[in-house]
Image (cartoon, rainbow, N blue to C red):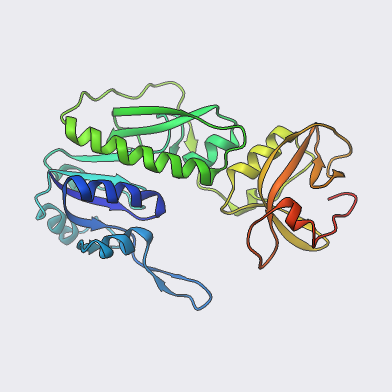
Amino acid sequence: MKVIFMGTPEFSVPVLNALHQTHEIVAVYCQPPRPAGRGKADRPSPVQARAEALGLPVRHPVSLRSEDAVRDFAALQADVAVVVAYGLILPQAILDAPRLGCLNIHASLLPRWRGAAPIHRAIMAGDRETGVCIMQMEAGLDTGPVLLRETVEIGAEETTADLHDRLSTLGARLIVGALEQLPLPALPQAAEGITYAAKIDKAEARVEFSKPAVEVDRLIRGLSPFPGAWTQVNGERIKLLRSRLAKGGGTPGQVLHGFTIACGTGAVEITEAQREGKRPMPAAEVLRGLILPATL
């Protein structure tokens, strides 16, 4: 089929690769290059970089609402558009342009976790499972009927980075299968159990050890690697990137042993952390150069 691909971050790249191997991609839409790095030079998104490496035409309009944008999109005469973490809302004229409409790869079990940060929020909420849905897009926010879905368990020590990679690979496999089977029956989403995965706010990232250990552990894993949950040690901000529940307890913030910290109830063991200006390291390596106070 003739496919328009619409995506921007690293999560979308495996999908682009899979579609490139199986269909004709007539255009790749992604967000424009953004300033990044110390020099703040414009850097193309992961999708743009990969599309250009594959020799695919790339477009990055700042909006899809103008008559010119709609006309250019429709002129591609695509059979279908595949959308995964693109970053722009698609107006109805865009949704209607491909012969088979626009399909979205969403990293949750809809209607749970509609919105911007479904992987983070699933871990932070303590969900035991999540998955990927292939959805027929409509004007509402992730409200369209579901064509395919597959469920995966969330591991007890899994981080957003870990789950991100698994779901990205799963999404690539599911969309290839969906395109092979079109048209598929579209199952409307349930009216109950709707939740919204709000965009992650950096203000959420400071660890409060007064909270129960299970909540602290979920926060650390859910915000890893970005923006990274953090605490201060001797005035230095330390990112906490991996953790697990531990035995023991004490005054909230009390260092029990190694990098095991007492919480409001229970304790967490930090297994990976990152000092300012350093790479992520196992906790034992971090502690070789960092003396923890009695209480964080």
Where residue 285 sits, quadrant-wise, is bottom right
Q: Tell me residue 46's x, y (percent).
A: 37, 60
Residue 66 in the figure: left or right of residue 209: left
Q: Tell me residue 119's x, y (percent).
A: 49, 40
Q: Tell me residue 110's x, y (percent).
A: 40, 29
Number of numbered markers: 0
- Tell me what residue is drawn at x 24 percent, y 51 percent: 5
- Tell me what residue is drawn at x 14 percent, y 38 percent: 100
Where residue 267 sits, quadrant-wise, is top right
In the rendered view of the protein, which quadrant contains the N terminus?
A: top left
Residue 106 in the figure: left or right of residue 53: right
Comparing 193 with 278, the one in front is: 278
Q: Is residue 170 visible?
A: yes
Q: Tell me residue 137's x, y (percent).
A: 27, 37
- Tell me what residue is drawn at x 37 percent, y 28 percent: 150
Residue 225 in the figure: left or right of residue 91: right
Comparing 9 with 269, the one in front is: 269
In the image, residue 224 above or below residue 211 = below
Where residue 159 sits, quadrant-wise, is top right
In the image, residue 174 above or below residue 5 = above
Comparing 194 with 292, the one in front is: 292
Q: Is residue 138 visible?
A: no
